[in-house]
Image (cartoon, rainbow, N blue to C red):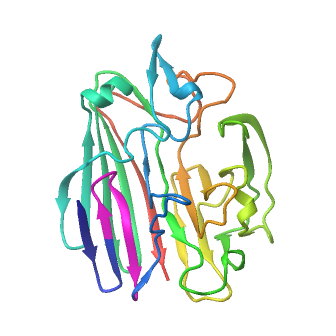
Amino acid sequence: MLITIENQALTVILDSQGAVLHSIRKDGLEYLWQGDPRFWKRRDANLFPYVGRLTQGRYLLEGKTYPLPTHGFCIGTEFQVTEQSGTAVRFTLEDSRQTLEQYPFRFAFHVEYRLAGDSIQKICRVENRNDRQMYFGIGGHPGFQVPLGEAGDFSQWQLVFQEACAPMRIDLDPDNYRLAGTERPFPLKDGTTLPLTHGLFDQDAVVLRNMARTVTLCSELSDRSVTVSYPDMPFLGLWHAPRTEAPYVCVEPWVSLPSHSAYMEDLAKQEHLIHLAAGDTYRTTMTITLK
């Protein structure tokens, strides 16, 4: 089901299947990637309860092995609409027989979108409805058109971090795109700027840590831009379909990382996952601002 929210600046369409962005328009221009099976048929995704790929598509927990798809089970799953107004909507996914077979926890996962001027605030909340601690990862996956409008081509656009930083690139195993166990410096032009090239994504996602928590997609040829802020997310994935000339880039704030390629992860022991106490609620925000 598609739901439209709007204000004087933005018209945003959300899809209850996956609780994702379907369209973002400002002044008649579409900013969100509109999907193309030649490159990536989706437009956005909610990554929960895991970010990325698992070794053998499985993980360990309390001595048992569980299957879980890449990025968890939200992609393509119908969410309930639990709150709606002209400028906001909240989607909710609760545990079910199907989720319990893959993830043995009772939960509620809320994804809320609110408009404020030129910005879309996305608020994610996870409720632990168990009498024990639960473990999960969470992340976003919005794709944006490159170029925005008809201003130049892909290579004339760039990602500019809000402040100078010295990111580290977390290496992925080229055979399976899971963690290789190594990382290396990822220098930025002037400490802030990453010029876009299609070859940047030939080995799948560029995964960074130690980067600034706000980044802007922009070009000297255009007044249009997209700024993504993710104050609570320590990792950032940047991606388009590998070894293609795909006309988009995904800006993916993550709280956790994929599985290590060399072994099956124990969910209770994997570094960076959220450990949420019984009865508690976890909250994180991401803001997309259009110019």
Q: Is residue 171 magenta?
A: no
> Residue 225's quadrant in the figure?
bottom right
- Looking at the magenta stretch, what is its main secondary structure? strand
**From where the camera sits, is residue 226 visible?**
yes
Residue sitting at 61 percent across and 57 percent down?
239
Q: Quadrant of residue 165?
A: bottom right
When the figure is inspected, residue 64 is found, relative to residue 9, above or below; the finding is above
Q: Residue at x 61, y 53 (%)?
A: 237
The magenta span reads 13-27
Classify residue 210 as left or right of residue 134.
right
Which residue is located at x 61 percent, y 59 percent?
Answer: 240
Residue 197 coordinates in the image, percent (x, y): 73, 68
Whether residue 104 is visible here, answered yes or no, is no
Tell me the residue at 43%/53% (across/down): 45
Q: Is residue 177 above or below residue 279?
A: below
Residue 20 magenta: yes
Q: Where is residue 164 in the image (x, y as percent from the top left)?
A: 73, 67
Quadrant location, the N terminus = bottom left
Position of residue 79 in the picture relative to residue 270 (left or right)? left
x and y percentages locating residue 82 in the rendered image: 18, 53
- Residue 287 placed where, x, y %? 45, 65
Examine the rendered structure and indicate whether residue 271 appears above or below residue 204.
above
